[in-house]
Amino acid sequence: MTKLDESYWTDRYHSGKIGWDIGYPSTPLKNYIDQLEDKSIRILIPGAGNAYEAEYLHMSGFSNVTVIDISKAPLAQLSAKCPEFGKEYIIHGDFFEHKGQYDLILEQTFFCAITPDLRPGYISKVHELLMAGGKVVGVLFDVELNVDRPPFGGHRAQYLPLFEAAFDLAVFEPCHNSIPPRQGSELFINCVKR
Ligand SMILES: C[S@@+](CC[C@H](N)C(=O)[O-])C[C@H]1O[C@@H](n2cnc3c(N)ncnc32)[C@H](O)[C@@H]1O
């Protein structure tokens, strides 16, 4: 299998092969963001890519939003689009090596971008980065996809034991407000760190 390293992802951005990039904040995440009242919470978006949700959070007055991506290419776009987004909140690096403490981690098409053998490590890393009571919220594909390259698919029954081991699952159900091309193929998750 191709190594999914920085150069793999940067090549995808430079060649414009970014089929995952919808160009706007996705409806399930946007609706979740819209009902958050405390705009000072510490939010992390791992594998943020072009980070439309981060831009939306910023425009909505959230003051502590961090994005991390292994590729510099989309992060440079975010800085260019949103110059007032603090540089210290735009991190070029590997999520699995990131250190920090957050109240909320937002997930969208990062979990499906890592090889399935890294999923337990994703869950333990998310757990480590969250405060007690912190949440990972977002969408996961609930459908068979590729087995040799991203996006990697999977199903609710496979994900449940991984998340249940460390989180209380407030929501882990079919997503009712996915964007049209993803309707019927996503779960919405809201998992609270135990
Ligand atoms: C499928 S894209 C999704 C981007 C964005 N979440 C979206 O919905 O448009 C996966 C992203 O994860 C990044 N990525 C892959 N492995 C990573 C890692 N170990 N740490 C941080 N970012 C990573 C890639 O560079 C890419 O931007």
Image: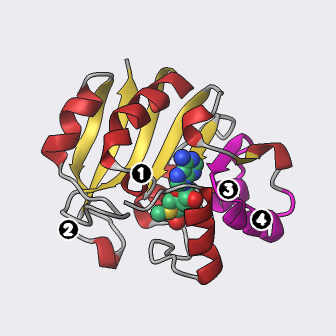
* Residue at 47% from the left image edge and 66% from the top image edge: 26
From mark 1 to mark 4, how far is it between C-alphas? 22 Å
Assess mark 1: CB under 8 A from ligand 1?
Answer: yes
The residue identified by callout 1 is: 114
Q: Report the disc number at residue 76.
A: 4
Select label 3 or label 2 by which is in front.
2
- What kind of element bears circle 2? loop
The residue identified by callout 3 is: 60
Residue 52 can be seen, yes or no: no
The reply to whether the magenta stretch includes residue 188 is no
- What kind of element bears circle 4? helix
From mark 4 to mark 3, how far is it between C-alphas? 21 Å
How far across and down, in percent of the image, does residue 183 sit?
Answer: 26, 71
Select label 2 or label 4 by which is in front.
4
- What kind of element bears circle 1? loop
Whether label 2 touches label 1, CB < 8 Å: no
The residue identified by callout 2 is: 184
From mark 2 to mark 1, how far is it between C-alphas? 22 Å
